[in-house]
Image (spheres, grey):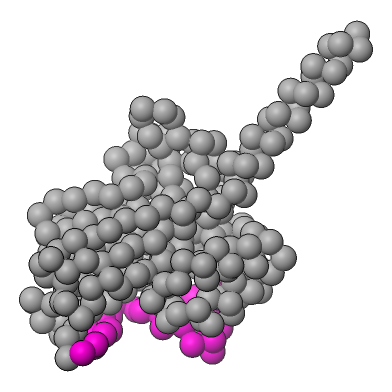
Amino acid sequence: MKRKLFIFILLIAGIWIFLYVNNTWLQTTSYTIQSNRIPKAFDNLTIVQLSDLHDATFGEKQTDLANKVKKLKPDLIFLTGDLVDSNRYNLTNSIHLVEQLVAIADVYYVTGNHEVAVNQVDEIKDALHSLGVKSLTNEAKMITHNGEEISIIGINDPLMNGLGDTETTIGDFMDEALANVPQDTYKLLLSHRPEAFDMYVKKEVDLVFTGHAHGGQFRLPGIGGLVAPGQGWFPAYTAGSHERGITTMLVNRGLGNSLIPFRILNRPEIIIVTLKST
């Protein structure tokens, strides 16, 4: 009896450790993006992308996560939506992180579906703006260095436009954002939704930063993510780099969880990208 109890306790402890590691041990994924469309002035530009925090906590007042980002020494930081969670809205928890990020580099932000669902988009954007975050609402910012330019484009989550067709809505948002961007400019896009990859390719965006899929929540060896919002079972876009034409889309596995409280074989992810002019 004691032996069985001991084995049971070991089993429970093992499961707890496994889940703890899978949901709190931050992983950094690095990408090098090479293109002859990247201006020489932006060679070696580094970008950290964070996505889908969902009010998760990494250290007291998010210091573990912020320190991880600081060690990467990024030139820019992109936040691609779901900074909060509509099921347990706690903006202060997210602001603790952002307060530290803005001291590291310029921060750019776009909404996710949870900001829209909680019906606090204006409150969230105002709080971020007060900290110096550049919130992009279907618009582009031109970044100039040594006489050369790239564009950083950000679009709203399509839920802002109701429950219509996601890809069509994203296409309309992109048309608005790209209206004044020269065609030959290297374009970085912040968009929450990876399932609109076909539209990003159609609009000839160079590099897209997305999230939303949570890595498929449970990742199966040799298969990938199990399920993702907007894509269903065994989705195509849950993690990694996807290329077609001149477009590369990066799918961030995200940091937190929402309706499903656990990740399996899917640690919270920080992405760092280095641009290389060829």
For this rendering, which residue is in front, 66 or 87?
Answer: 66
Q: Is residue 124 left or right of residue 35?
A: right
Q: Residue 73 colored magenta? A: no
- Asked where in the image residue 38 lies, by quadrant, the reply is bottom left
Regarding residue 240, the answer to whether it shows in the image is yes
- Residue lying at 75% horizontally and 27% vertically, measured from the top left: 12
Q: Residue 140 colored magenta? A: yes
For this rendering, which residue is in front, 211 or 120?
Answer: 211
Magenta region = 119-146
> Which quadrant is the N terminus positioned in?
top right
- Determine the residue located farthest toward the top in the rendered image: 1
For this rendering, which residue is in front, 235 or 44?
Answer: 44
The correct choice, above or below, for 157 with respect to 14 in the image is below
- Residue lying at 76% horizontally and 30% vertically, measured from the top left: 13
Regarding residue 166, the answer to whether it shows in the image is no
Residue 254 percent across, percent down from the top left:
47, 54
- Residue lying at 42% horizontally and 81% vertically, measured from the top left: 106
Residue 133 percent across, percent down from the top left:
46, 83
Residue 84 percent across, percent down from the top left:
56, 65
> Which quadrant is the C terminus positioned in?
bottom left
- Determine the residue located farthest toward the right in the rendered image: 2
